[in-house]
Amino acid sequence: MLDIVSRFQLDGTPIGCVDFGSGHINKTYLVVTNRPHLYVLQNVNTRTFPDADGLMRNVILVTDHIREKVSDPRQVLQLVPTTDEQLYILEEGNQLWRVYEYVTGSICLDQVESPNDFRQAGKAFGSFQRQMSDFPAERLTEVIPDFHHTPKRFQAFHRAIEADRKNRAADVRDEIAFFLEREASAGKLIQLLESGELPLRVTHNDTKLNNVMLDEATREPLCIVDLDTVMPGLAAYDFGDAIRFGASEAAEDERNLSKVRMSLELFRAFSEGFVSVYADSMTQMERDTLCDGARLMTLECGVRFLTDYLQGDTYFHITRPEHNLDRARTQIALVRDMESKWREMQKTIAEL
Ligand code: GN1
Ligand code: MG
């Protein structure tokens, strides 16, 4: 690893490389040097992102665009060039390596410590959408086509059930039934997009709380990370995926399902933050479908986890045998909880 890292223009000599972060797709390391200067090294998963150049072009376009709009360099990810002045290394076998400046004085959270943290995350993702609102979406490569096309995620789910490669379907009959009972509602956002009732935006598409760096002193947002899935999308995707992950009172892989609930207090906090910076840019239909985004992103993620479980865990990194099943079950619990809190969720948005 130090071999790779020393091909980038670092301040100091790299002396260590340790696992970092909690992503399910890429491998991320913190690089320590003999100077007080930290870096983040990533080996991007090119099975998930086969178009490595397209992906890096997106990252460069997006970070350059945001850099024009911010005052503090910590407010946007900064790629570190290689010794031959490239912004990434792409080697044989489609091995993609890149290094970012570590965002000094920042923290990122896997779970909120207070509603205020989540309000700040709402501001961060709302600002990201606002910053990207004057960027021509067609310049971005669609690195994973149909990423949030929920009906197509269901089609893949059906194929996994039919193939049942690992003979797991019989044991998860109830979970499968839960999703299939809701399949009819999966196309709501896509249909509104196709009919022109919802506008296409540049969205982040993976708005987990741990993709926001907060200032460790003020707890205010510094920057958004994990730009690999920035693509044309819907405002409701970013709002919804953030609620799915961050408004849950438990971890995404919690096994004690009685702990898994969507907190209305956290839902309100995020909504306040998001709407406070982004409301002016949103259409009425976008506002009206934010709650649908929360429910559909959770349903979709659950379907993806269960699909991966049925296929033998080939997509999301796992650290225990039933990890993806546990994740699918938390998403089921969250969807159920959202359905029971639907009126309050909608009332919250209407009030804001
Ligand atoms: C993956 O890379 P990471 O862990 O931030 C996934 C998201 C899922 C998320 C579930 C490219 O995100 O779509 O919502 O796991 N990213 C990709 O935790 O598939
Ligand atoms: Mg991530």
Image (cartoon, rainbow, N blue to C red):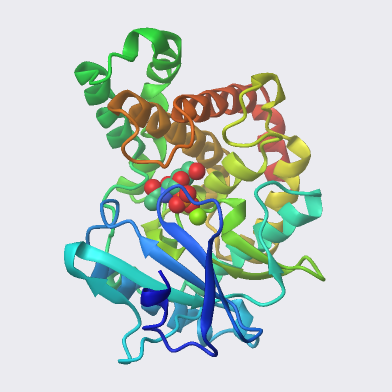
Nearer to us in this view, 271 or 54: 54
Q: Please tell me which residue is depicted at 66% across the width and 21% down the height of the picture.
A: 256
Q: Is residue 105 left or right of residue 14?
A: right
Horizontal and vertical percent for residue 307?
A: 34, 28
Horizontal and vertical percent for residue 56?
A: 32, 72
**Is residue 28 placed above or below 106 in the rendered structure?**
above
State which quarter of the image contains the N terminus. bottom left
Nearer to us in this view, 50 or 65: 50
Q: Is residue 61 left or right of residue 244?
A: left
Q: Please tell me which residue is depicted at 54% across the width and 77% down the height of the picture.
A: 15
Q: Is residue 179 visible?
A: yes
Horizontal and vertical percent for residue 207?
A: 53, 53
Q: Is residue 299 left or right of residue 341?
A: left
Horizontal and vertical percent for residue 14?
A: 51, 80
Q: Is residue 197 visible?
A: no
Q: How many marks?
A: 0
Location of residue 61 by image quarter: bottom left
**Is residue 174 placed above or below 53 in the rendered structure?**
above
Q: Please tell me which residue is depicted at 68% across the width and 44% down the height of the picture.
A: 349
Location of residue 35 by image quarter: bottom right
Location of residue 258 by image quarter: top right
